[in-house]
Amino acid sequence: MSGLLRSELRKIFTTRLWWGLLIGLVVTWALLSLLQGLIAGQSTGGGAAPLPGLDNPATVRSVYTGGLDYARIFALAFGIIAMAGEYRQQTITATVLGSPRRSRVVVSKVAGVALTGLGYGVVGVVTGLLVGVPIILARHGALHLTSDDVPRALVAAAAAVALWAVVGLGVGTLIRNQIVALLVAIGVAWIAEPLLAVGLNAAHAGKVAQYLPSMATSALTSPETSQGGVVVTILPWWAGALVLIGYAVVSGGLGAALTLRRDIS
C-alpha cells in the first residue's frame, strides 16, 4: 500500500499540475485576505452602520480564511484532473495492471489526492496569516490567534480544501472526459450552486440552502450573515464539516465503486 501511495504522489509531483494550481490558489488567497483586511471597519455609505472592524473575531477569521471560497475551486479542479487525466493519458491502465488488487489502487489514489489537497489548504491558511497579520497589526486590530475559534477555523479551512479535492476526484471518475468534467463541476460549484443558495435564502428557504456544498464550506469559518437585507442561514461549524465530509464520501465512494467495476482498458 505504501508503495502505491508513493507512486500516486510521484505522479502528482512530477507534473506541472500541482504547482500551477498552487500558485493560483496562493495568489487568490493573498488578494482576498488583503481585501478583507482593507475593507474591515469601513463605512458602506447610505447611513448604514460600518462593517465590523478588525477587533471582531469573525472578521479576523474572514481575513485569515479569505481565500477559502476560491481555494475550493482550485482543489476541485486538481481532484478532477488527477483522475480524469489518468483516463486521458491512459496511465490508469498501467497502474491497475501493476497492482493485483484494484481496491488498493483506489485507496492510494484517494489518499494521495486528499494529502495533496490538505497541503494546498495548509499553504492557503499560511498565506492568509502572512497577509492578514501585518494588516491587522497595522490597523490596530486584535490577532485572536489562540482564541475565539480562530485556531479551529484555520484547521477547518485547510481540511475543507482537502475534502473538495476528494469531491473532484469523484467527479473525475464519474465524468472521464477531463474538459467536460472541469466545465460541469466548476460551472456548478462556482456559479450555479452559489446562485441557487442566494435564491433559496431570498425565498426564505435558508434551511435547505445551508446544506449545499458552498454553504457548508462557509459554515466552517463564518457566522450567520446578512446580504442585501437577506439573512443567510448557516449551519454550526461542526454540522457544516459533517455535511462537507458527506459530499466527499459520496463523491469519492461513487468514484471508487466505478473504478472497481469499470473496464479501464
Image (cartoon, rainbow, N blue to C red):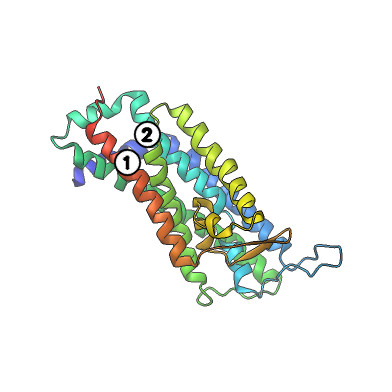
- Mark count: 2
Image height check: is 241 above or below 264? below
Q: Amino acid at mark 1?
A: Leu
Query: Which residue appears at 20% of the width and 43% of the height?
Result: 3
Q: Quadrant of residue 202?
A: bottom right
Q: Which residue is mark 2?
A: 174
The part of the image, by quadrant, that contains residue 136 is bottom right
Label pair 2/1, CB-CB below 8 angstroms: yes
Q: In which quadrant is the C terminus drawn? A: top left
Horizontal side of residue 129 vs 162, given as left or right: right
Q: Is residue 230 left or right of residue 247?
A: right
Residue 63 in the image, given as x and y percentages of width and height: 61, 62
Identified by mark 2, the residue type is Leu
Query: Which SS class for mark 1?
Result: helix
What residue did someone put label 1 on?
Answer: 254
Residue 199, x across and y down, in percent? 64, 49
Residue pictured at 43% horizontal, 28% vertical: 178
